[in-house]
Amino acid sequence: MYSVKTLNKISAKGTGLLGKNYAVGDSIDNPNAILVRSAQVDTDSFSSDLLAVARAGAGVNNITIDKASAKGVCVFNTPGANANAVAELVFTTLGMALRNIHKSLSWIGGLQGKEDKEISEAVEKNKAAFTGGELAGKTIGVIGLGKIGVLVSNGAIGRGMHVIAYEPYPSVGNMLMLNSTVRVVQSIEELIIASQVITVHVPFMPATKGLLNEMNLTSFRGSYLLNFARNGIVSESGISSFLAADKQNTYVTDFPTKSDLANGQVISFPHLGASTEEAEENCAVMAVEQLKDYLDYGIVHNSVNFPVIDNRPAASVKNRIVVINNDVPNMIALISKVFGDAGININSFKNESNGKIGYNLIDIDTAVPQSLVDALKKIEQIIRVRVIEL
């Protein structure tokens, strides 16, 4: 029996997949796993029973990743599960900005209480003030070609736009889905110079902090900058200089700040990117499926701190030992020696690493003596040992 603590409301379409061998709820004290959306998770504040944290969403800046790794806690996310919701919102809000919908709605609200004739006359007299532009024919620069970036790029092509994209670490799977007419450039500067619209879709991490900034945005001659990724990817000074360059320039963001709300050139939303029923269900299902695979079999998919490993046990296997270690030389030999010294035959030994964490799945068809577990734990650089009865 595993216990799973929910720190946010998680769609029942996901939690319903856990089954009778799982206790799930928000009142569990010492969970084996955590399901979370936006709540802050400090893994050090939970007991040593914690094995995994699954984020029903893509960003994981609300989770203490380094602390989790140090304790052998696997952290999952759900990349792509909310991609369609975010991509659709990009075009909804870009269309709003181009057509001055937000400005016209604010103006027309002032006509409340007037008679139909007055409203009609006012509309005809003032509608020219809200004349906008069209998506078709414009050049959009898409920063990041993950699942969201690819959907935005392809959607822009379908709307008659020209697309320039930048992705420093392309995924083969994602690139195969990209429309062949998208022009992929080798530098962010090249994209900025050539674009009339820029939209950013990369994760927030040290390498992307201030990716768009006061220095490189001076080359941007377009009027629309969209951020549905995370705050911090576009620096505050970069936003300020972009907006100050032209009173028609518009910043569209899903992560408003105090200065954003005070600026009439900013269209801001309360983090609505993934806020659709479909996206929440997709994220919950994906997070739960990954969590179950990890807890039941030690299988790792879409972890942000552990290497991918998909090795299902054979029917004859009785126990699977999970060994998590710092990725240093000679660990496989040291682990194998412990089994040899104990006289235990290994049916299957699967090892993967990501440069920081070494992850081992060892299958045996006999019982696991406590002395074996104790001997493994004594090896320097081993972070965690876990036995899964199959």
Image: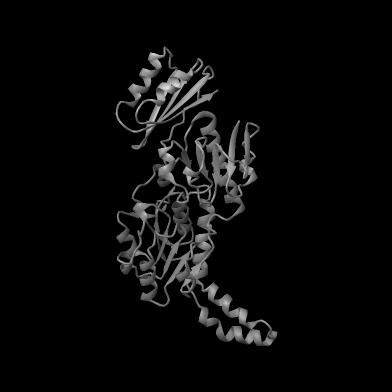
User: Residue 56, relative to residue 229: is it above or below?
Assistant: above
Q: Quadrant of residue 247?
A: bottom left
Query: In the image, what residue occupies the spot 35% across and 24% down?
Result: 332
In-front residue for pair 96/330: 330
- The colour scheme used to paint the residues is one colour
Query: In the image, what residue occupies the spot 30% across and 26% down?
Result: 330
Left or right: where 314 falls relative to 139: right
In-front residue for pair 328/185: 328
Say which quadrant the C terminus sits in.
top right
Q: Position of residue 56 (x, y in %)?
A: 54, 47
Query: In the image, what residue occupies the spot 51% across and 16% down?
Result: 367
Query: In the image, what residue occupies the spot 35% across and 37% down?
Result: 356
Q: Position of residue 370 (x, y in %)?
A: 48, 20
Q: Quadrant of residue 29?
A: top right
The mark tally for this picture is 0
Say which quadrant the N terminus sits in.
top right
Q: Position of residue 318 (x, y in %)?
A: 53, 18
In-front residue for pair 41/276: 41
Left or right: where 350 falls relative to 275: left
Left or right: where 28 falls relative to 49: right
User: Residue 103, relative to residue 366: is it above or below?
Assistant: below
In-front residue for pair 101/296: 296
Q: Position of residue 16 (x, y in %)?
A: 65, 39
